[in-house]
Amino acid sequence: MSVLKRAKTWEISESEGESDAETKPSIKCVAFTDQGDDETATANSPTDNLEQGNKDYNTNCKSTAITEPSDTLVAPRPARSGTASPGRKRRTKEEMEADRQRVEERKEAREKLKRVRAEEKEERREDQQRRKEAAERQKSLRPENCLKCLTVCIDPALLQDDGSDVLLGTLSAVEWRSSIETQQLPYSITWTRDLPLEKDSSGPLEEEQVLLVLGLTDFMGMVVSVKQTLHGNGEESAVESFFKLLSECLNRDAKMVVTVLVMGSNANSWTGTWDVHELSQRSQLGMEDLDIEEVLVFLQLYRNITVVFLDSWQDVTDHVCAVTKALSKRPYKLLTERCELPFCVDGSWASGVRVERDGAGLGEVWSRQITQLNRVSPAVASTLTTAYPSPQILLQAYSRLESEEEKRGLLAGLLVKTGGKERRIGPEISARVYRSLTAQNPQLVLD
Protein backbone atom coordinates (compact mmCIF):
# COMPACT_ATOMS: atom_id res chain seq x y z
CA MET A 1 0.00 0.00 0.00
CA SER A 2 1.58 3.24 -1.07
CA VAL A 3 1.48 6.26 1.14
CA LEU A 4 1.01 9.60 -0.42
CA LYS A 5 2.37 12.64 1.28
CA ARG A 6 1.57 16.27 0.72
CA ALA A 7 3.59 19.19 1.83
CA LYS A 8 1.94 21.83 3.97
CA THR A 9 3.20 25.25 3.27
CA TRP A 10 3.01 28.19 5.50
CA GLU A 11 4.45 31.64 5.51
CA ILE A 12 5.64 33.78 8.32
CA SER A 13 5.42 37.52 7.79
CA GLU A 14 5.92 40.42 10.10
CA SER A 15 3.31 43.18 10.29
CA GLU A 16 4.90 45.35 12.95
CA GLY A 17 6.64 47.93 10.86
CA GLU A 18 8.31 48.66 7.68
CA SER A 19 11.74 48.55 9.32
CA ASP A 20 11.19 44.98 10.46
CA ALA A 21 9.75 44.02 7.09
CA GLU A 22 12.82 45.37 5.41
CA THR A 23 15.29 43.62 7.69
CA LYS A 24 13.50 40.26 8.27
CA PRO A 25 12.91 38.08 5.26
CA SER A 26 9.81 35.98 4.98
CA ILE A 27 10.21 32.28 5.81
CA LYS A 28 8.26 29.57 4.03
CA CYS A 29 8.07 26.16 5.68
CA VAL A 30 7.02 22.95 4.05
CA ALA A 31 6.05 19.92 6.11
CA PHE A 32 5.19 16.40 5.00
CA THR A 33 2.49 14.51 6.85
CA ASP A 34 0.78 11.20 6.38
CA GLN A 35 -2.83 11.65 5.23
CA GLY A 36 -3.78 8.06 4.60
CA ASP A 37 -5.11 7.22 1.17
CA ASP A 38 -6.69 10.63 0.46
CA GLU A 39 -4.65 13.65 -0.54
CA THR A 40 -6.14 17.02 0.45
CA ALA A 41 -4.74 20.50 0.34
CA THR A 42 -5.69 23.13 2.87
CA ALA A 43 -4.91 26.79 2.62
CA ASN A 44 -5.16 28.80 5.82
CA SER A 45 -3.98 32.07 7.11
CA PRO A 46 -0.34 32.53 7.94
CA THR A 47 -0.98 32.29 11.68
CA ASP A 48 -3.09 29.16 11.41
CA ASN A 49 -0.63 27.54 9.10
CA LEU A 50 2.21 28.21 11.53
CA GLU A 51 0.29 26.79 14.49
CA GLN A 52 -0.86 23.77 12.57
CA GLY A 53 2.69 23.23 11.27
CA ASN A 54 4.16 23.41 14.75
CA LYS A 55 1.57 20.96 16.01
CA ASP A 56 2.26 18.52 13.23
CA TYR A 57 5.99 18.95 13.69
CA ASN A 58 5.76 18.24 17.41
CA THR A 59 3.48 15.23 17.02
CA ASN A 60 5.63 13.69 14.28
CA CYS A 61 9.13 13.31 15.81
CA LYS A 62 10.47 11.56 12.77
CA SER A 63 10.49 14.63 10.52
CA THR A 64 13.67 16.59 9.77
CA ALA A 65 14.17 20.14 8.52
CA ILE A 66 15.22 20.94 5.00
CA THR A 67 16.31 24.43 4.12
CA GLU A 68 15.58 25.58 0.61
CA PRO A 69 17.61 28.25 -1.11
CA SER A 70 14.63 30.66 -1.38
CA ASP A 71 14.23 31.06 2.41
CA THR A 72 11.78 28.14 2.46
CA LEU A 73 12.05 25.75 5.42
CA VAL A 74 11.09 22.22 4.41
CA ALA A 75 10.42 19.61 7.09
CA PRO A 76 12.03 16.22 6.40
CA ARG A 77 10.01 13.22 5.36
CA PRO A 78 8.99 11.10 8.30
CA ALA A 79 10.22 7.50 8.46
CA ARG A 80 7.89 4.95 7.01
CA SER A 81 5.78 3.00 9.43
CA GLY A 82 7.07 -0.52 10.13
CA THR A 83 10.69 0.19 9.05
CA ALA A 84 12.34 1.16 12.36
CA SER A 85 16.18 1.37 12.19
CA PRO A 86 17.86 -1.45 14.01
CA GLY A 87 19.65 -0.59 17.29
CA ARG A 88 23.44 -1.16 17.94
CA LYS A 89 24.17 -4.69 19.04
CA ARG A 90 25.70 -4.87 22.48
CA ARG A 91 28.87 -7.02 22.88
CA THR A 92 28.97 -9.87 25.33
CA LYS A 93 31.48 -10.20 28.15
CA GLU A 94 33.24 -12.97 26.26
CA GLU A 95 33.72 -10.74 23.21
CA MET A 96 34.94 -7.87 25.35
CA GLU A 97 37.35 -10.18 27.15
CA ALA A 98 38.59 -11.58 23.83
CA ASP A 99 39.14 -8.03 22.50
CA ARG A 100 41.00 -7.06 25.65
CA GLN A 101 43.11 -10.20 25.41
CA ARG A 102 43.98 -9.46 21.80
CA VAL A 103 45.00 -5.94 22.77
CA GLU A 104 47.20 -7.31 25.54
CA GLU A 105 48.77 -9.83 23.17
CA ARG A 106 49.55 -7.14 20.63
CA LYS A 107 51.03 -5.00 23.37
CA GLU A 108 53.16 -7.88 24.64
CA ALA A 109 54.29 -8.65 21.09
CA ARG A 110 55.35 -5.03 20.61
CA GLU A 111 57.20 -5.05 23.92
CA LYS A 112 58.89 -8.35 23.07
CA LEU A 113 59.93 -7.07 19.65
CA LYS A 114 61.27 -3.96 21.30
CA ARG A 115 63.29 -6.02 23.80
CA VAL A 116 64.63 -8.28 21.03
CA ARG A 117 65.73 -5.30 18.98
CA ALA A 118 67.37 -3.76 22.04
CA GLU A 119 69.20 -7.03 22.78
CA GLU A 120 70.35 -7.35 19.17
CA LYS A 121 71.57 -3.77 19.25
CA GLU A 122 73.45 -4.44 22.49
CA GLU A 123 74.97 -7.62 21.04
CA ARG A 124 76.11 -5.75 17.95
CA ARG A 125 77.62 -3.06 20.13
CA GLU A 126 79.43 -5.63 22.29
CA ASP A 127 80.63 -7.49 19.21
CA GLN A 128 81.99 -4.28 17.73
CA GLN A 129 83.68 -3.52 21.04
CA ARG A 130 85.25 -6.99 21.15
CA ARG A 131 86.47 -6.64 17.58
CA LYS A 132 87.91 -3.25 18.37
CA GLU A 133 89.73 -4.56 21.43
CA ALA A 134 91.02 -7.58 19.50
CA ALA A 135 92.28 -5.32 16.73
CA GLU A 136 93.99 -3.09 19.29
CA ARG A 137 95.59 -6.11 20.99
CA GLN A 138 96.78 -7.47 17.66
CA LYS A 139 98.11 -4.04 16.75
CA SER A 140 99.99 -3.85 20.04
CA LEU A 141 101.70 -7.16 19.22
CA ARG A 142 103.36 -5.76 16.13
CA PRO A 143 107.15 -5.56 16.41
CA GLU A 144 107.28 -1.76 16.18
CA ASN A 145 104.83 -1.51 19.09
CA CYS A 146 106.42 -4.30 21.14
CA LEU A 147 109.74 -2.44 21.04
CA LYS A 148 108.07 0.33 23.05
CA CYS A 149 107.17 -2.22 25.77
CA LEU A 150 110.65 -3.76 26.12
CA THR A 151 113.21 -2.54 28.62
CA VAL A 152 116.91 -3.49 28.44
CA CYS A 153 118.14 -4.11 32.00
CA ILE A 154 121.93 -3.72 32.44
CA ASP A 155 123.86 -4.84 35.50
CA PRO A 156 125.84 -1.96 37.11
CA ALA A 157 129.04 -4.02 37.06
CA LEU A 158 129.20 -3.68 33.27
CA LEU A 159 129.41 0.10 33.53
CA GLN A 160 132.83 -0.16 35.12
CA ASP A 161 134.24 -0.78 31.64
CA ASP A 162 134.79 2.35 29.58
CA GLY A 163 133.46 0.69 26.44
CA SER A 164 129.99 0.32 27.95
CA ASP A 165 129.24 3.90 26.81
CA VAL A 166 128.85 2.51 23.29
CA LEU A 167 125.95 0.32 24.43
CA LEU A 168 124.21 3.09 26.40
CA GLY A 169 124.65 5.60 23.58
CA THR A 170 123.21 3.24 21.00
CA LEU A 171 120.14 2.43 23.12
CA SER A 172 119.55 6.14 23.65
CA ALA A 173 119.97 6.91 19.94
CA VAL A 174 117.33 4.37 18.86
CA GLU A 175 115.05 5.54 21.74
CA TRP A 176 114.81 2.15 23.39
CA ARG A 177 114.10 1.99 27.07
CA SER A 178 116.95 0.88 29.33
CA SER A 179 117.55 0.67 33.06
CA ILE A 180 120.51 0.02 35.35
CA GLU A 181 119.48 -2.74 37.77
CA THR A 182 121.31 -5.36 39.79
CA GLN A 183 120.85 -8.76 38.17
CA GLN A 184 120.95 -12.29 39.54
CA LEU A 185 124.05 -12.88 37.44
CA PRO A 186 126.69 -10.16 37.66
CA TYR A 187 127.83 -8.70 34.35
CA SER A 188 124.57 -9.76 32.67
CA ILE A 189 121.91 -8.11 30.52
CA THR A 190 118.23 -9.05 30.68
CA TRP A 191 114.92 -7.82 29.24
CA THR A 192 111.49 -7.08 30.70
CA ARG A 193 108.20 -6.61 28.88
CA ASP A 194 105.27 -4.46 30.00
CA LEU A 195 101.91 -6.25 29.70
CA PRO A 196 98.38 -4.77 29.55
CA LEU A 197 96.92 -4.04 32.96
CA GLU A 198 93.97 -6.39 32.48
CA LYS A 199 96.33 -9.31 31.84
CA ASP A 200 98.97 -8.82 34.49
CA SER A 201 98.84 -6.83 37.68
CA SER A 202 102.11 -8.05 39.22
CA GLY A 203 104.39 -5.93 37.05
CA PRO A 204 106.47 -6.41 33.92
CA LEU A 205 107.25 -9.86 32.53
CA GLU A 206 110.84 -11.04 32.62
CA GLU A 207 112.06 -12.52 29.35
CA GLU A 208 113.97 -15.79 29.28
CA GLN A 209 116.95 -14.44 27.37
CA VAL A 210 120.07 -13.58 29.43
CA LEU A 211 123.36 -12.27 28.08
CA LEU A 212 126.43 -12.80 30.27
CA VAL A 213 129.31 -10.52 29.21
CA LEU A 214 132.66 -11.90 30.35
CA GLY A 215 136.26 -11.03 29.76
CA LEU A 216 138.78 -13.60 28.65
CA THR A 217 140.13 -14.19 32.16
CA ASP A 218 136.68 -14.90 33.61
CA PHE A 219 135.89 -17.22 30.73
CA MET A 220 139.10 -19.18 31.33
CA GLY A 221 138.07 -19.61 34.95
CA MET A 222 134.74 -21.01 33.77
CA VAL A 223 136.52 -23.44 31.47
CA VAL A 224 138.69 -24.70 34.33
CA SER A 225 135.61 -25.20 36.52
CA VAL A 226 133.82 -27.16 33.79
CA LYS A 227 136.87 -29.33 33.19
CA GLN A 228 137.05 -30.17 36.87
CA THR A 229 133.38 -31.12 36.81
CA LEU A 230 133.84 -33.34 33.76
CA HIS A 231 136.81 -35.18 35.30
CA GLY A 232 134.93 -35.95 38.47
CA ASN A 233 136.65 -33.42 40.71
CA GLY A 234 133.81 -31.85 42.65
CA GLU A 235 135.95 -29.30 44.46
CA GLU A 236 135.78 -25.77 43.10
CA SER A 237 138.92 -23.94 42.14
CA ALA A 238 140.36 -21.26 44.30
CA VAL A 239 139.20 -18.61 41.90
CA GLU A 240 135.44 -17.90 42.01
CA SER A 241 133.92 -19.31 38.81
CA PHE A 242 130.93 -18.01 36.90
CA PHE A 243 129.99 -21.59 36.11
CA LYS A 244 128.86 -22.09 39.70
CA LEU A 245 126.68 -18.99 39.53
CA LEU A 246 125.25 -20.10 36.19
CA SER A 247 124.42 -23.53 37.54
CA GLU A 248 122.60 -22.06 40.53
CA CYS A 249 120.54 -19.72 38.34
CA LEU A 250 119.65 -22.51 35.92
CA ASN A 251 118.58 -24.74 38.79
CA ARG A 252 116.22 -22.02 40.03
CA ASP A 253 114.81 -21.23 36.58
CA ALA A 254 115.13 -24.03 34.04
CA LYS A 255 113.56 -21.87 31.29
CA MET A 256 116.43 -19.40 31.33
CA VAL A 257 118.34 -19.22 28.04
CA VAL A 258 121.90 -17.99 28.68
CA THR A 259 124.35 -16.74 26.07
CA VAL A 260 127.93 -16.05 27.19
CA LEU A 261 129.61 -13.21 25.32
CA VAL A 262 133.38 -13.52 25.62
CA MET A 263 134.68 -10.04 24.92
CA GLY A 264 138.22 -8.90 24.22
CA SER A 265 139.26 -11.98 22.25
CA ASN A 266 139.50 -12.77 18.59
CA ALA A 267 136.43 -14.53 17.27
CA ASN A 268 138.57 -17.43 16.08
CA SER A 269 140.93 -17.45 19.05
CA TRP A 270 139.67 -20.71 20.47
CA THR A 271 140.42 -22.48 17.18
CA GLY A 272 144.16 -21.80 17.28
CA THR A 273 144.83 -18.13 16.50
CA TRP A 274 145.64 -17.00 20.03
CA ASP A 275 147.74 -13.91 20.73
CA VAL A 276 150.72 -13.80 23.11
CA HIS A 277 148.67 -12.89 26.20
CA GLU A 278 146.09 -15.60 25.53
CA LEU A 279 148.82 -18.18 24.88
CA SER A 280 150.40 -17.37 28.23
CA GLN A 281 147.05 -17.83 29.97
CA ARG A 282 146.48 -21.16 28.24
CA SER A 283 149.93 -22.38 29.11
CA GLN A 284 149.46 -21.46 32.73
CA LEU A 285 146.14 -23.29 32.84
CA GLY A 286 147.47 -26.24 30.89
CA MET A 287 144.62 -26.19 28.33
CA GLU A 288 144.60 -27.06 24.69
CA ASP A 289 142.15 -26.36 21.87
CA LEU A 290 140.52 -29.72 22.37
CA ASP A 291 139.82 -28.91 26.01
CA ILE A 292 138.04 -25.68 25.07
CA GLU A 293 135.99 -27.44 22.41
CA GLU A 294 135.00 -30.06 24.95
CA VAL A 295 133.83 -27.34 27.35
CA LEU A 296 131.83 -25.58 24.64
CA VAL A 297 130.05 -28.81 23.69
CA PHE A 298 129.28 -29.57 27.34
CA LEU A 299 127.81 -26.11 27.94
CA GLN A 300 125.69 -26.32 24.82
CA LEU A 301 124.33 -29.86 25.30
CA TYR A 302 123.96 -30.13 29.06
CA ARG A 303 123.33 -26.55 30.16
CA ASN A 304 121.85 -24.97 27.01
CA ILE A 305 124.50 -22.25 27.22
CA THR A 306 125.79 -20.73 23.99
CA VAL A 307 129.24 -19.14 23.91
CA VAL A 308 129.94 -16.31 21.44
CA PHE A 309 133.39 -14.75 21.03
CA LEU A 310 133.38 -11.00 20.26
CA ASP A 311 136.08 -8.43 19.70
CA SER A 312 134.75 -5.20 21.25
CA TRP A 313 131.84 -3.43 22.89
CA GLN A 314 130.52 -2.52 19.47
CA ASP A 315 130.03 -6.22 18.74
CA VAL A 316 128.34 -6.63 22.11
CA THR A 317 126.04 -3.69 21.29
CA ASP A 318 125.12 -5.19 17.93
CA HIS A 319 124.30 -8.50 19.61
CA VAL A 320 122.12 -6.77 22.21
CA CYS A 321 120.21 -4.93 19.46
CA ALA A 322 119.69 -8.14 17.50
CA VAL A 323 118.27 -9.95 20.56
CA THR A 324 116.00 -6.99 21.35
CA LYS A 325 114.55 -7.01 17.84
CA ALA A 326 114.02 -10.77 18.01
CA LEU A 327 112.14 -10.42 21.31
CA SER A 328 109.91 -7.72 19.81
CA LYS A 329 108.87 -10.10 17.02
CA ARG A 330 108.13 -13.04 19.32
CA PRO A 331 104.53 -12.17 20.40
CA TYR A 332 103.29 -11.62 16.85
CA LYS A 333 105.07 -14.75 15.67
CA LEU A 334 103.43 -16.82 18.41
CA LEU A 335 100.04 -15.37 17.48
CA THR A 336 100.41 -16.35 13.82
CA GLU A 337 101.69 -19.83 14.68
CA ARG A 338 98.64 -20.57 16.83
CA CYS A 339 96.23 -19.84 13.96
CA GLU A 340 94.79 -22.92 12.34
CA LEU A 341 95.61 -23.48 8.71
CA PRO A 342 92.49 -22.70 6.63
CA PHE A 343 93.06 -25.57 4.23
CA CYS A 344 93.19 -28.25 6.96
CA VAL A 345 89.92 -30.15 7.34
CA ASP A 346 89.17 -30.86 10.97
CA GLY A 347 88.97 -34.59 11.62
CA SER A 348 89.71 -35.52 8.02
CA TRP A 349 93.06 -36.09 6.34
CA ALA A 350 94.83 -33.67 8.66
CA SER A 351 94.39 -35.88 11.73
CA GLY A 352 93.66 -39.25 10.09
CA VAL A 353 90.88 -41.62 11.07
CA ARG A 354 89.81 -41.54 14.70
CA VAL A 355 89.92 -44.99 16.31
CA GLU A 356 87.86 -45.48 19.46
CA ARG A 357 88.71 -47.73 22.38
CA ASP A 358 86.18 -50.33 21.21
CA GLY A 359 87.93 -50.59 17.83
CA ALA A 360 85.51 -48.44 15.87
CA GLY A 361 87.33 -46.89 12.95
CA LEU A 362 89.81 -49.71 12.35
CA GLY A 363 87.89 -50.78 9.24
CA GLU A 364 88.36 -47.32 7.73
CA VAL A 365 92.07 -47.46 8.55
CA TRP A 366 92.32 -50.85 6.80
CA SER A 367 90.54 -49.48 3.74
CA ARG A 368 92.80 -46.41 3.54
CA GLN A 369 95.84 -48.62 3.90
CA ILE A 370 94.80 -50.55 0.80
CA THR A 371 94.17 -47.37 -1.21
CA GLN A 372 97.79 -46.31 -0.62
CA LEU A 373 98.82 -48.93 -3.16
CA ASN A 374 99.28 -47.72 -6.70
CA ARG A 375 96.17 -47.87 -8.95
CA VAL A 376 93.89 -49.11 -6.15
CA SER A 377 90.63 -47.16 -6.12
CA PRO A 378 88.34 -46.72 -3.09
CA ALA A 379 85.84 -49.10 -4.73
CA VAL A 380 88.46 -51.85 -4.95
CA ALA A 381 89.52 -51.22 -1.35
CA SER A 382 85.90 -51.34 -0.20
CA THR A 383 85.34 -54.69 -1.94
CA LEU A 384 88.51 -56.15 -0.43
CA THR A 385 87.78 -54.95 3.12
CA THR A 386 84.22 -56.23 2.87
CA ALA A 387 85.46 -59.72 1.98
CA TYR A 388 88.29 -59.57 4.54
CA PRO A 389 87.39 -57.09 7.32
CA SER A 390 90.93 -57.01 8.82
CA PRO A 391 94.52 -57.73 7.73
CA GLN A 392 94.69 -60.64 10.16
CA ILE A 393 91.74 -62.37 8.47
CA LEU A 394 93.40 -61.96 5.07
CA LEU A 395 96.70 -63.34 6.37
CA GLN A 396 94.87 -66.35 7.78
CA ALA A 397 93.32 -66.92 4.35
CA TYR A 398 96.79 -66.81 2.79
CA SER A 399 98.10 -69.33 5.33
CA ARG A 400 95.43 -71.88 4.38
CA LEU A 401 96.65 -71.94 0.77
CA GLU A 402 99.59 -74.13 -0.23
CA SER A 403 101.17 -72.65 -3.37
CA GLU A 404 102.43 -69.11 -3.98
CA GLU A 405 100.40 -68.89 -7.14
CA GLU A 406 97.16 -69.51 -5.27
CA LYS A 407 98.09 -66.90 -2.69
CA ARG A 408 98.89 -64.27 -5.32
CA GLY A 409 95.56 -64.89 -7.08
CA LEU A 410 93.36 -65.12 -3.99
CA LEU A 411 91.77 -61.70 -4.53
CA ALA A 412 91.62 -61.78 -8.33
CA GLY A 413 88.04 -63.10 -8.50
CA LEU A 414 86.42 -60.48 -6.22
CA LEU A 415 83.76 -58.41 -8.05
CA VAL A 416 83.95 -54.61 -7.90
CA LYS A 417 80.78 -52.59 -8.63
CA THR A 418 81.37 -49.13 -10.08
CA GLY A 419 78.79 -47.05 -11.93
CA GLY A 420 76.38 -49.93 -12.39
CA LYS A 421 79.07 -52.14 -13.89
CA GLU A 422 80.90 -55.08 -12.41
CA ARG A 423 84.51 -56.04 -12.91
CA ARG A 424 87.02 -58.23 -11.17
CA ILE A 425 89.97 -57.02 -9.13
CA GLY A 426 92.33 -58.94 -11.35
CA PRO A 427 95.58 -60.83 -10.76
CA GLU A 428 97.82 -57.74 -10.83
CA ILE A 429 96.23 -55.93 -7.87
CA SER A 430 95.79 -59.24 -6.05
CA ALA A 431 99.52 -59.99 -6.36
CA ARG A 432 100.50 -56.48 -5.19
CA VAL A 433 98.31 -56.76 -2.09
CA TYR A 434 99.85 -60.14 -1.31
CA ARG A 435 103.41 -58.82 -1.65
CA SER A 436 102.66 -55.73 0.49
CA LEU A 437 101.45 -57.91 3.37
CA THR A 438 103.94 -60.78 3.23
CA ALA A 439 107.20 -59.39 1.78
CA GLN A 440 110.21 -59.30 4.11
CA ASN A 441 112.34 -57.04 1.94
CA PRO A 442 111.69 -53.34 2.75
CA GLN A 443 113.28 -52.32 -0.56
CA LEU A 444 110.94 -54.48 -2.65
CA VAL A 445 109.14 -52.66 -5.46
CA LEU A 446 105.49 -53.75 -5.42
CA ASP A 447 104.69 -52.87 -9.05
Image (cartoon, grey):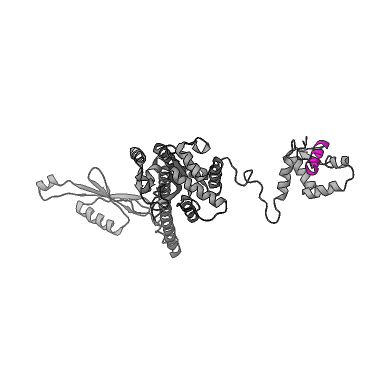
Q: Is residue 430 inside the magenta stretch?
A: yes
Quadrant position of the C terminus in the picture: top right
Q: Nearer the viewer, residue 348 or 325?
A: 325
* Residue 344 falls inside the magenta stretch: no
Above-or-below relation of 273 to 81: above
Please tell me whether residue 249 is drawn above or below residue 312 in the rendered image.
Answer: below
Residue 371 in the image: x percent, y percent?
73, 40
**Viewer-side residue, 200 vs 104:** 200
Percent position of residue 41, x then y: 29, 50
Residue at image point 32% right, 56% down: 62
Q: Position of residue 425 (x, y in %)?
A: 80, 38
Horizontally, residue 8 falls left or right of residue 421, namely left
Please give the count of numbered marks on the rendered protein.
Answer: 0
Q: Quadrant of residue 159?
A: top left
Residue drawn at the location 46% of the way across and 50% of the way down: 242
Range drawn in magenta: 426-439
Q: Specify the quadrant of the image occupied by residue 263.
A: top left
- Prevailing secondary structure of the magenta residues: helix
Identity of the residue furthest to the right in this view = 402
154 vs 294, nearest the viewer: 294
Residue 26, percent across and down?
Answer: 18, 46
Asked if 405 appears above or below 85 in the picture, the reply is above
Of the pair 332 and 173, the residue shown nearer to us: 173
